């Protein structure tokens, strides 16, 4: 419901050819060695080499297995990017030793996913503390026709056996409001491997004084239906793909009138070792049997990486033409893939332009339309995770 986990995851023939080549190579060496004094030495060496190559091939083709250590924990913060959901996506495009390419995703907005100790959340959420190990501060809102929940936190059980959601909390009509699930909604059971299927059933029943009563039932099925390699603007990763189907029944009583709706949400997550959160998550809603994509989020980095860049000062921002006329050409040289923020302001500090840019490792060139700006002195500022990296002056003529 609004987070990375809850509203936020062709080489067989070549392998045969490699194995056949190894066998042919061994046969030739064996034939050569029949009349040679080093027959036994060469045969043993070739056999060991063959075993090593086979072991390497098997290892390279093996699916990863996820443990609790691969799931976000308190004190971690990640850079995420909401991408344009208008993409071509086929949910059945999956399976063993599969390759997914989402390198052409386009950015809508950059954000962060921050994971905190449950005891650091609002004391009004205390009863969620008892069933939870970690909370995600999403900063997102949940809205329907009757209720808006602001500044949402998602609470999770996270241990050696399971990762699942225990509830959520946020501000409703100006009041901090916790919503605890009847049971933990399972997302992963550990160790998590290709082919695993898990099910859970949960829900909640709350009453918001002078506003509404809200009951929700949730029936979730998770299947790890693919493994292989995925490429996003954030990099290339070995992954498991998890498909989750959640049948949701909502009943809201507003002004003593009940309103009910049943719908199905589909979540696709691609999880990699030690990444904490999905390297990609696609959410969809099933309407008349057709899946409509509602959200695409990919991991674009770790905040710790941003702090390291700032500390080492190993980046550069430069204006390529100064003075500039109708277009501002500038370059960002950055040591890693990162979501950055560019702000153009005038000499009074008034912000004239504010937008996100996705940088790859190395030099990145951008063009900004500055036709609407009046002639004068302006500043181009580069930010990462809310911290300014560099500020340079340019002139618009």
Image: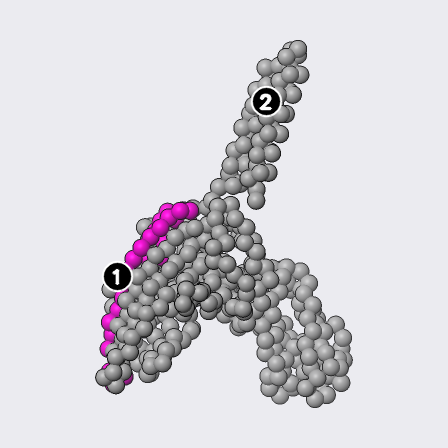
Judge whether 46 appears above or below 86 on screen: above
Magenta region? 186-211
Q: Quadrant of the N terminus?
A: bottom left
Q: Secondary structure at mark 1?
A: strand
> In terms of sequence position, does the residue under pointer 1 or pointer 2 come before the other?
2
77 sits to left or right of 326 = left
* Residue 235, image quadrant: bottom right
Checking the image for residue 45, the label placed there is 2
* Secondary structure at numbered mark 2: helix
**In this orientation, which residue lies closer to the viewer: 130 or 155?**
155
The residue under the point 63% across, 80% down is 344
> Given this view, does label 1 or label 2 mark the residue nearer the observer?
1
Specify few, some or many for label 2: CA neighbours under 10 Å numbering under 14, 14-19, or 20 or more: few
| 299 is within the stretch colored magenta | no
For residue 274, the mark is none
The answer to whether residue 194 is magenta is yes
Residue 103 vs 47, above or below: the answer is below
Q: Which mark is residue 183?
A: 1
Residue 155: where, in percent of width, then height? 33, 65
Q: Mostly what secondary structure, the magenta segment?
A: strand
Residue 119 position in % (x across, y down): 32, 67
Of 102 and 380, the residue lying toward us: 102
Residue 322 is situated, as x and y percent measured from the top left of the image, at 76, 77
């Amino acid at each position: 419901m609004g987070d990375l986990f809850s509203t936020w995851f062709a080489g067989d023939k070549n392998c045969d050819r490699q194995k056949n080549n190894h066998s042919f190579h061994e046969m030739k060496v064996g034939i050569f060695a029949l009349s040679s004094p080093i027959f036994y030495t060469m045969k043993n060496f070739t056999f060991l080499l063959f075993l090593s190559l086979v072991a390497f091939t098997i290892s390279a083709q093996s699916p990863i297995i996820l443990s609790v250590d691969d799931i976000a924990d308190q004190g971690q913060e990640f850079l995420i990017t909401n991408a344009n959901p208008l993409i071509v996506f086929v949910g059945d495009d999956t399976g063993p030793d599969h390759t997914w390419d989402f390198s052409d995703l386009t950015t809508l907005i950059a954000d962060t996913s921050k994971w905190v100790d449950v005891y650091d959340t609002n004391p009004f959420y205390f009863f969620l503390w008892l069933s939870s190990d970690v909370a995600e501060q999403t900063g997102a809102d949940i809205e329907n026709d009757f209720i808006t929940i602001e500044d949402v936190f998602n609470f999770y059980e996270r241990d050696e056996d399971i990762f699942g959601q225990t509830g959520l909390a946020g501000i409703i009509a100006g009041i901090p409001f916790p919503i605890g699930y009847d049971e933990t909604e399972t997302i992963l059971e550990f160790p998590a491997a290709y082919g695993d299927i898990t099910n859970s059933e949960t829900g909640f029943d709350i009453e918001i004084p002078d506003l509404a009563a809200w009951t929700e039932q949730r029936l979730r099925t998770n299947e790890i239906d693919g493994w292989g390699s995925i490429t996003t603007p954030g990099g290339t990763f070995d992954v498991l793909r998890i498909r989750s189907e959640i049948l949701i029944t909502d009943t809201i009583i507003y002004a003593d009138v009940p309103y009910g709706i049943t719908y199905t949400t589909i979540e696709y997550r691609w999880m990699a070792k030690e990444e904490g959160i999905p390297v990609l998550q696609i959410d969809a809603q099933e309407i008349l049997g057709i899946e409509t994509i509602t959200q695409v989020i990919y991991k674009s980095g770790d905040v710790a990486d941003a702090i390291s860049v700032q500390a080492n000062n190993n980046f550069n921002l430069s204006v390529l033409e100064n003075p500039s006329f109708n277009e501002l050409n500038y370059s960002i040289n950055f040591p890693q893939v990162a979501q950055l923020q560019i702000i153009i302001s005038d000499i009074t500090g008034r912000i004239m332009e504010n937008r996100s840019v996705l940088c790859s490792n190395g030099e990145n060139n951008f063009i900004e339309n500055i036709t609407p700006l009046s002639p004068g002195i302006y500043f181009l500022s580069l930010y990462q995770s809310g911290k300014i990296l560099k500020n340079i002056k340019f002139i618009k003529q």
